[in-house]
């Protein structure tokens, strides 16, 4: 069956507005104040007022936290603060990673529950973790224990996947390092990126090892900031002041097994990617720019393979030297610096950047003639991906 013959909920929705708060390592501001900045900017960018908005969605939702500063403000605090009277309200953690609220918003719009939905993601992990460290006392304060299979600090689990990739496919640290180097090169063109100092391969190889083979520069950088987008019914597109971005297709299927030790292959996003491509007539060669999750650099490599930009095990040679994934390459990735250098804005930051690229508003990091973008977010066990298309102007 052709994707054109599917009744796709994605076809009912456009991204009409985008907004971002200040971004920094430790801003010392409340999650609610940052959120109000980003959603106000997004609603204004969409040419709307809060009276026009009837939906609000977020990740992960109130009461959910993986640590200090992770969750952002609850939905109820946000709609109280702006005087919103929503007909649709949804926050969720389990599901297709940070794409969950976008999926929920699209479905709500497509089935008439809302016409304009604000989606936001806010983090204050930079400030919160700095404050937590300052209160620890004595050796061994705040220990993190690991279990025999799959549990414990995230770097250890993803280091296992990286080690297996190195063993099975001959991947090298120099190849893996290109993800970090490319992110830093792009971040240097992004005035709000949190890491903008020059970075060399030798700097990368000399960096402190965290969990072999992942070093400090393979891990994303905690920061404070908020990102928001406005989803609107496609009928609003002619009235939007900015070029809208169309949601072409989504892939939401989780990996077959949720634990590292039970993972049957090295592509956590394989099933989600297959679902996404099955909902579109576009193919990997049509993608002009991509935002690929880089909570750890190995995840970007695995998404390159899962999405079909290269074959299984071929991401090392694909990124070697960095030319293919640079701004002038065949597949520029993480053009805002990603989470490794731009800051861990946790998912929605990639969507914001891809919208800038498709609107031709990415300034000195603009990819030439960007018409189609891919976004892939998350890792075991929560993953999701989507294709975005530039609207006409």
Image (spheres, grey):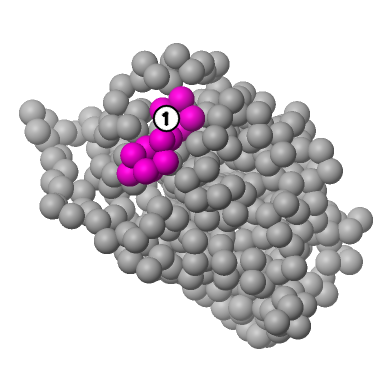
* Residue 159: image location, x then y, percent: 31, 40
Residue 165 counted in the magenta span:
yes
Name the image quarter holding residue 213.
top left
- Which residue in the structure is indicated by mark 1? 172
Residue 223 counted in the magenta span:
no
Q: Quadrant of the C terminus?
A: bottom right
Q: Nearer the viewer, residue 308 or 16?
A: 308
Q: Nearer the viewer, residue 374 or 17?
A: 374
Q: Residue at x 59, y 43 (%)?
A: 21
Name the image quarter holding residue 54.
bottom right
Work out which residue is located at the far right of the displayed protein and give it. Answer: 393
Q: Nearer the viewer, residue 99 or 257?
A: 257
* Residue 111: image location, x then y, percent: 66, 85
Report whether residue 115 is seen. no
Q: Residue at x 64, y 66 (%)?
A: 277
Q: Which residues are magenta?
A: 164-176
Report whether residue 169 is seen. yes
* Residue 292: image location, x then y, percent: 55, 47
Q: Residue at x 25, y 56 (%)?
A: 261
Judge from the rendering whether residue 10 lies leftward or rightward of residue 210; answer left or right.
right
């Amino acid at each position: 069956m052709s994707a054109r013959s599917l009744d796709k909920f994605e076809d009912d929705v456009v991204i009409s507005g985008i907004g971002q708060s200040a971004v920094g390592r430790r801003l010392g501001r409340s999650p609610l104040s940052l959120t109000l900045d980003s959603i106000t900017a997004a609603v204004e960018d969409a040419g709307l007022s809060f009276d026009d908005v009837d939906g609000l969605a977020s990740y992960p939702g109130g009461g959910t936290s993986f640590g200090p500063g992770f969750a952002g403000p609850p939905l109820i605090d946000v709609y109280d603060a702006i005087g919103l009277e929503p007909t649709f309200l949804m926050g969720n953690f389990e599901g297709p990673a940070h794409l969950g609220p976008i999926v929920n918003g699209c479905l709500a719009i497509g089935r008439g529950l809302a016409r304009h939905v604000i989606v936001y993601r806010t983090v204050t992990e930079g400030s919160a973790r700095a404050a937590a460290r300052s209160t620890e006392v004595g050796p061994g304060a705040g220990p993190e224990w690991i279990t025999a299979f799959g549990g414990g600090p995230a770097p250890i689990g993803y280091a296992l996947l990286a080690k297996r990739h190195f063993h099975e496919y001959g991947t090298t640290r120099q190849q893996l390092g290109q993800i970090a180097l490319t992110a830093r090169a792009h971040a240097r063109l992004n005035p709000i990126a949190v890491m903008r100092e020059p970075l060399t391969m030798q700097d990368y190889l000399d960096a402190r090892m965290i969990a072999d083979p992942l070093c400090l520069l393979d891990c994303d950088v905690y920061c404070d900031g908020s990102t928001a987008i406005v989803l609107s019914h496609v009928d609003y597109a002619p009235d939007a002041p900015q070029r809208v971005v169309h949601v072409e297709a989504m892939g939401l299927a989780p990996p077959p097994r949720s634990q590292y030790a039970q993972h049957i292959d090295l592509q956590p996003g394989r099933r989600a990617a297959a679902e996404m491509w099955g909902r579109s007539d576009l193919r990997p060669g049509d993608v002009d720019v991509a935002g690929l999750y880089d909570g750890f650099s190995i995840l970007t490599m695995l998404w390159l393979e899962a999405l079909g930009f290269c074959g299984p095990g071929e991401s090392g040679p694909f990124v070697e030297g960095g030319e293919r994934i640079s701004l002038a390459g065949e597949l520029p990735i993480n053009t805002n610096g990603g989470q490794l250098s731009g800051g861990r804005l946790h998912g929605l930051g990639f969507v914001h950047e891809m919208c800038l690229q498709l609107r031709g508003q990415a300034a000195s990091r603009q990819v030439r003639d960007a018409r189609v973008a891919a976004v892939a977010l998350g890792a075991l066990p929560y993953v999701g991906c989507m294709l975005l298309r530039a609207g006409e102007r």
